[in-house]
Image (tube, grey):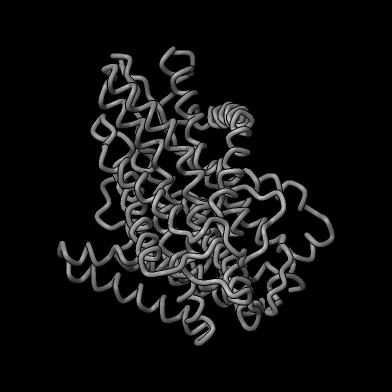
Amino acid sequence: MGDEGTRTDGTTARNGYVDLLRAAAIVLVVLGHWLITALVREPDGTLRAPELMATVPWTQWLTLGFQIMPLFFLAGGYAAAGSWSRTLAGGGTAAGWIRGRAIRLLLPTTAYLVPALGGLAVAAALGADPALLGMIGWALAMQFWFLPVYLAISALTPWLYALHRRWGLGSVAALAAAALILDLAVLAADADWADRAGLLNYLLVWAVAYQLGFAWRDGGAAARPGFGAALAVGGAAGYAALVGFGPFPVSLVLVSGEEISNTDPPSAAMLSWLLAQCGLCLLLAPYAERLLRAGRGARPVEPLGRAAMSLYLWHMVPVLAAGAAFYLTDLAPEPEVGSPAWWAWRPAWGLVLALLLAALLAALRPVDRLLLRAGRRAGPNAPVRGVVRTAALLLGLAAACWSLAHWAAEGLARPGTVAPSLLLAFAAGTLLVGGAAAGGQGRATAPRVPGAVPSVERAGEGVTGPAG
């Protein structure tokens, strides 16, 4: 492949195609969320957010293009393979590497949560409508589900990579088979315990794409177009069969009222579409890399990469601002959701949100610089030594993941109040992760990326969050 994907000696070069995948994915995440956001002003002056895919069922087909989570995990696995292999070559440890990855995700998330939770708490204290606060809290946290999943898979990277080194593509097949068997068992059991067990597929399914990223970076069969083509065709055929003849819905995001969801947790149909999407990306990789090396289309990728974590975390804030400015004041047209007039209004709606988001990101630049300094002070490459520090790291990760998962499922303020227990768990977890290092910066085990920001996208060469 001519760059990082073909090297196994610990040296590295940026893979422009991986960066392009991440940039395209984050843009689709933002556009997808903006597209499906529908606001309606009720006669009493309150705002309601009807669910587009439940109101207009045909729009569920759009999720085949906007559900791009496989890209994040594929690119994340590719980058993590390089980062972890360099850490091993430099004598680093699993605990230190895991801590560094977690810090780069938790720091920008904390910077987002402080004003979000603070604003909701103040509004609740001033007597704001609990239902409105619940809706706002849901909008502010709808993207959070990715965070605990990615934290957990990042923590498992050393062992997942060991499986890859031992079994190659067999490790991908094993994870896919385990996810498929578990999903079918959950459907057959139809019991509470089975539903809880099914949550394991949040790790198994997305780890399939992550593991494919390992195989892609190391070359071999996964880097050949024929493998990508077979994966794309087979995955698409599997999705079509499971939707057409099986019990699975078309939508690749959660839709209210559906008995079976393809994403909560990821289903066999989601697994099939993941394979199809990853296969297509692998098929196109050699051609895209040649174009990028020729200098075509690479220019917008780097700024999008730098802003990716901010884009992911903050992109629903403009929706709330525009809703207040245009809907609560009755300035925005309000055609029936899903009508031709409503669709005609979408481009203007997207343009307004894009301008607001650009202004927000410009205002956040000082925060980004502050996060960069905080990330350096935290010593992301510092070692974690001893049983006590390792236990603190694992406990902190568990607490942070627990709170993030609850916020993802319930919103930041449901029912109308900020839960102190979740706030304390996240704060304690983040502090435990940050304090788990032995002796400050310690010996660096991986090179610092010049100009990096403290996000999993750039400083850790990982992948930012997305949505769905």
Instruction: Work out whether residue 265 or residue 108 is closer to the camera in this orientation and state it.
Output: 108
Residue 229 against residue 244 in the figure, above or below: below
Q: Residue furthest right?
A: 294
Q: Residue at x 78, y 59 (%)?
A: 292
Residue 56: x percent and y percent? 38, 40
Q: Is residue 35 left or right of residue 270?
A: right
Count of number-bearing discs = 0
Instruction: Work out whether residue 63 or residue 291 is closer to the camera in this orientation and state it.
Output: 291
Q: Residue at x 35, y 77 (%)?
A: 178
Residue 123: x percent and y percent? 33, 21
Residue 329 against residue 58 in the figure, above or below: above
Q: Residue furthest front?
A: 439
Instruction: Work out whether residue 22 or residue 56 is closer to the camera in this orientation and state it.
Output: 22
Q: Residue at x 63, y 72 (%)?
A: 86
Residue 408: x percent and y percent? 35, 46
Residue 163 against residue 49 in the figure, above or below: below
Q: Quadrant of the N terminus?
A: bottom right
